[in-house]
Amino acid sequence: MGNHSADSVSFFLFFFRGAVDSWLCYRLAGWWGHDPATRFQMPAKFKPILGAQGYQQSNPSVLTTVSLLGSLQVFKAAGGVPVLRERSKVLTAHLERLLSSSPYFIELDEAKREPRSPCFTIITPKDPESRGAQLSLLFLPLGKGVMQKVFANMQSHGVVGDERQPDVIRLSPVPLYNEIADCAAAVEVLNNALASNYNSPFI
């Protein structure tokens, strides 16, 4: 729900019925995950703390920790994760409706027939509970450079997406600062990008 790079502070949550240590054969071992009773003895063998704490790694960077604190404060001021999640679902559903009404949109089943004209489909699950804010758009025909041309056009018009080679653009309306109007603007730019390249030699 926030934006961060690969080296930022993060966490993961365990759901388990039994001991969390019993089902994972391979694990990452870090200083903070070792039994505190023997941690400073520097034993040769790693002895994890029982439970999820045993998966802690090492000392977090001061800069990333401070950034995380600032982010959490913004989340709190915005009403917390439940409020932001509901806003996120509304924004993404609206973006999905706009994309689905594009003259260049085709359903996923139709995409399997390998259309020859530039178009796109949505490969993200339709169920809001099975996705986050992001929608992944698959551009067709595959491997013909459609995505690259559309992505460059969208960037030049101020739409910040995320490309995944060779044929996917990911769009994510962020509930902290995007509005309904931003969704409409992004889809308009996307449609114009496809229109301007419709007669290009993709094939």
Image (spheres, grey):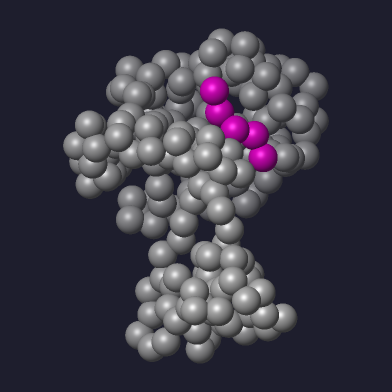
Up-down: is 29 above or below 118?
below
Q: Which residues are magenta?
A: 160-164
Residue 97 location, quadrant = top left
Up-down: is 132 above or below 23?
above
Residue lying at the far front in this picture: please name it.
41
Does residue 199 appear left or right of residue 80 in this picture?
right
Q: Which x, y percent locates residue 140?
A: 66, 37
Looking at the image, which is closer to me, 115 or 8?
8
Residue at 49%, 74% (x, y): give it: 36
Does residue 184 appear left or right of residue 76 in this picture?
right
The C terminus lies in quadrant: top right
Dominant SS in magenta: strand
Q: Which x, y percent locates residue 186?
A: 46, 20
Q: Which x, y percent locates residue 11?
A: 46, 56
Looking at the image, which is closer to me, 142 or 63?
63
Q: How many marks?
A: 0
Residue at 64%, 23% (x, y): give it: 150
Does residue 4 appear left or right of residue 199 in this picture?
left
Residue at 80%, 22% (x, y): give it: 201
The N terminus lies in quadrant: top left
Q: Which x, y percent locates residue 103?
A: 48, 26
Residue at 62%, 11% (x, y): give it: 156
Up-down: is 171 above or below 197?
below
